[in-house]
Image: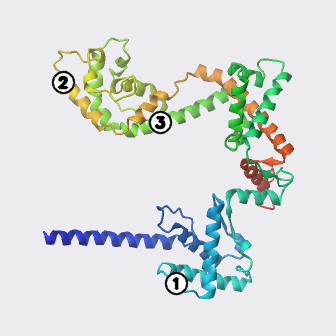
Amino acid sequence: MTQSYSSDFIKQEAILHDLISQDTQHRQDALTLQSFIVEAPAGAGKTELLTQRYLKLLSVVNAPEEIIALTFTNKAAAEMRNRILKSLDDAQKNAPVDALHKQQTRDLALAALQHAKHQQWQLLAQPSRLRILTIDALCSSLSAQMPLLSRLGGQPRVADDPDAHYLEAAKRTLAMVAQEKSIDAPISAVLTFMQNDMQTLADLLANMLAKREQWLPIIGSHQHAAIEEISAQCAHIIDACIEDKLRQAYQTFPDHLQHILMPVARFAASNLTEDHPLNALLDWHHPLSFEASHLSQWLTLLQLIMTSSGEIRKSGGLNVKMGFPKDHPDKKLHIDTFEQVIASIQQADALLALRQLPVVTPQELLENSRIVQAFSTVLQYAAAHLLHVFQSGGEVDFVAISRAAINALSDEQGATDLA
């Protein structure tokens, strides 16, 4: 017994040693000048590693402004800045190193100070040269440097409540319906589609304006596109959504489980009438993939393995209505196989999600594409009105600032001088 315990302890110690060695090597790799993604739980030392990487870069760049450290919050930016400045200050004062892992931070800080002295940066006297800021602050900085090109015309303040601006722009857009002379005009068309529910449509437009960075770059292509082209684009998007869900369902119900269930499905289908939905499984011999064209077959299969309420079907529900005659000699064998398959299903939610997917015919897509085109135009109107609302109020949202930064970095001729 003692020998067994000793053997287990030695194995665990060896595994721990390997993990520590791998972690040490990964930390060294992250300090090279290549790109890395660092993932680790809280307390694992990610911030310390980022500090070391920043200090390492300070020892090789021509100017500290060449390094940009971005965070999501002001608090995180302040913490990172304080850590770096403290590391540099402690290195300059030769303060004691209170932990072994911080010795590397000290060495990197000394190298950074030496390089800074040679370049005459005076980092500790001018800490503002360390560009450690939020993404929004970076965008604001870029747009402020080229206000005309960024189309803000200055540096407006960020609105505390941009939702009010979104709604105002939506209402101004819908008010344009008075200028339209045909029910086929864009705003009239979307109002008809929404059953003239002006308030709901205004709310929808306002919500879309808050996410306009996601659709503005691509929605302009709908304005002059043929209906057939829009229909094809919509079909592609729908197929992509369907295949994403089918891929998750396929992971839950892969080939080997499908092969096991095939004889059961064919048995059930053979005992049902031709008009029964499960009759489509009579010739099921090949596994269903996650191609969008297989959705209808997946939905048929779900009728066998799931109840109408979305629960996994129990073997007691395999009655004559499901293709399992009471006195059939093979009934028990197939029920046992069914139970084996059902017991192997781990994520029933992935299968249930398939019932929420749209089944759209090409004709329906073609008809709906006209509405898509109308909504695309209306959304462009709304985005233009939002710009006017922002300008009149002297306020913007973070989306406007990020788009202004993009405008400041590129124009029709390509990269700007700022870029």
Residue at left offset 83%, top offset 27%: 176
Q: Mark 3 points at which residue?
A: 245
Disc number for residue 332? 2
Note whether 106 is above or below 174 in the view shown. below
Note whether 185 is above or below 380 in the view shown. above
* Amino acid, disc 2: Lys
284 and 406: which is toward the camera? 406
Indicate the quadrant where residue 294 lies. top left
Indicate the quadrant where residue 215 lies. top right
In space, the residues marked 2 and 3 are separated at their CA atoms by 33 Å
**Label 3 residue SS:** helix
* Amino acid, disc 3: Lys
Residue at left offset 29%, top offset 33%: 342
Mark 1 or mark 3, earlier in chain: 1
Mark 2 or mark 3, earlier in chain: 3
Q: Position of residue 57 (x, y in %)?
A: 62, 74
- Crowding around mark 2 (Cα neighbors within 10 Å: few <14, some 14 to 19, many 20+) is some
Q: Mark 1 points at which residue?
A: 97
Note whether 402 is above or below 295 in the view shown. below
Q: Position of residue 151 (x, y in %)?
A: 83, 49
- Crowding around mark 1 (Cα neighbors within 10 Å: few <14, some 14 to 19, many 20+) is some
43 and 174: which is toward the camera? 43
Q: Position of residue 224 (x, y in %)?
A: 76, 31
**Quadrant of the rendering where the C terminus is positioned:** bottom right
In space, the residues marked 2 and 1 are separated at their CA atoms by 74 Å
Is the residue under label 3 in contact with that under label 1 (CB below 8 Å)? Answer: no
In space, the residues marked 1 and 3 are separated at their CA atoms by 53 Å
120 and 247: which is toward the camera? 120
